[in-house]
């Protein structure tokens, strides 16, 4: 004889409000959710309770499992900054995000760093200067200024124009009043070598006043390989330019 089909009842899920069918037994009648996913969500909801914030005593949300494990709870204001610390500079008590924090403000950080300065030599010019010990890195050079840092870098990493090119470029731009020597334009300026770098064993030897001139991009293409020096350009071009 076939086994009779058990009676079923329709219930409503307390999480998603969907109707679901379950067996009409004590266990089925006690069932509150339609799926395993909703059952997990209900478990989380039932685990939520309230407790007192460890810092300010304010009521805040926590879990029953945290309470039973004697774990502290924190309100929204102290969930991130929860560690009670004392500043090693001014002695002020404050709340920190990390247990390793020992200074309460930027002013105290600056004062602390100033107290930790040591005297070292610049790796480029050998000048003695003071530097915070926290800005000194092992096996890395220290410099007294940004200029020394840049100059040292250019020496160690010369471009195909040589390590002195940046300084010469600024010098030539200033000498030519930041204008194209041919048309007077102040846009898209470039520096031209009348005698090319390939004719020099050391690219730094190609940088001197009579071998360099400032031209805009268009004029640079036009005068390429036309003149042998700045003097040659001035003698052959400038008179015609002044007449026009």
Image: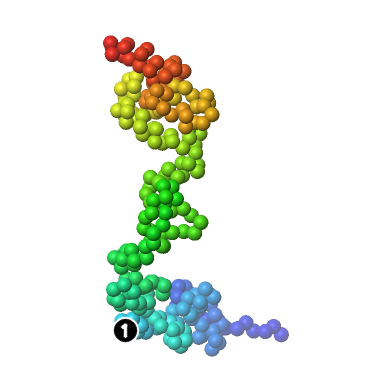
Q: Quadrant of residue 66?
A: bottom left
Q: Which residue is pictured at 44% across the width and 36% down the height?
A: 164
Would residue 36 be found to the left or right of residue 102 on screen? right
Q: Is residue 32 visible?
A: yes
Image coordinates of residue 142 in percent, x first then y, are 43, 53
Which corner quadrant holds the N terminus? Answer: bottom right
Q: Is residue 81 visible?
A: no
Q: Which residue is pictured at 69% across the width and 83% down the height?
A: 2
Image coordinates of residue 131 in percent, x first then y, are 38, 58
Compared to residue 167, the image places residue 80 above or below, namely below
Image coordinates of residue 112 in percent, x first then y, are 34, 67
Number of residues whose C-alpha sits closer than 10 Å to that of mark 1, classed few (under 14), some (14–19) or many (20 or more): few
Residue linked to disc 1: 57
How many marks the image carries: the answer is 1
Image coordinates of residue 198 in percent, x first then y, are 53, 26
Q: Which residue is pictured at 54% across the width and 29% down the height?
A: 201
Compared to residue 148, the image places residue 205 above or below, namely above
Which is more toward the observer, 23 or 171? 171
Which is more toward the observer, 206 or 10? 206
Query: Which secondary structure, mark 1?
Result: loop
Q: Quadrant of residue 83?
A: bottom left
Which is more toward the observer, 63 or 144? 144
Q: Which residue is pictured at 37% across the width and 62% down the height?
A: 117
User: Going by the picture, which residue comes out furthest to the right?
Assistant: 1
- Render colour scheme: rainbow
Which is more toward the observer, 47 or 142? 142
Which corner quadrant holds the C terminus? Answer: top left
């Amino acid at each position: 004889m076939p086994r009779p089909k058990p009676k079923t009842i329709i219930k409503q899920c307390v999480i998603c409000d969907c109707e679901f069918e379950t067996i009409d037994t004590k266990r089925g009648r006690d069932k509150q959710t339609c799926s395993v996913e909703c059952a997990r969500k209900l478990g989380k909801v039932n685990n939520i309770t309230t407790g007192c914030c460890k810092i300010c005593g304010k009521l805040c949300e926590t879990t029953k499992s945290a309470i039973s494990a004697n774990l502290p709870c924190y309100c929204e204001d102290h969930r991130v900054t929860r560690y009670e610390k004392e500043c090693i500079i001014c002695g002020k008590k404050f709340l920190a995000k990390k247990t390793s924090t020992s200074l309460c403000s930027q002013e105290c950080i600056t004062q602390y760093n100033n107290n930790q300065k040591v005297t070292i030599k610049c790796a480029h010019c050998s000048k003695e200067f003071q530097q915070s010990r926290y800005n000194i890195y092992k096996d890395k050079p220290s410099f007294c200024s940004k200029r020394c840092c840049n100059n040292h870098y250019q020496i160690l990493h010369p471009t195909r124009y040589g390590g002195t090119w940046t300084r010469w470029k600024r010098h030539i731009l200033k000498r030519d009043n930041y204008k194209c020597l041919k048309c007077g334009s102040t846009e898209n300026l470039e520096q031209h070598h009348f005698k090319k770098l390939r004719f020099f064993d050391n690219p730094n030897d190609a940088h001197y006043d009579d071998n360099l001139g400032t031209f805009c991009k268009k004029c640079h293409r036009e005068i390429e390989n036309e003149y042998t020096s700045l003097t040659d350009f001035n003698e052959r071009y400038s008179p015609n330019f002044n007449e026009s």
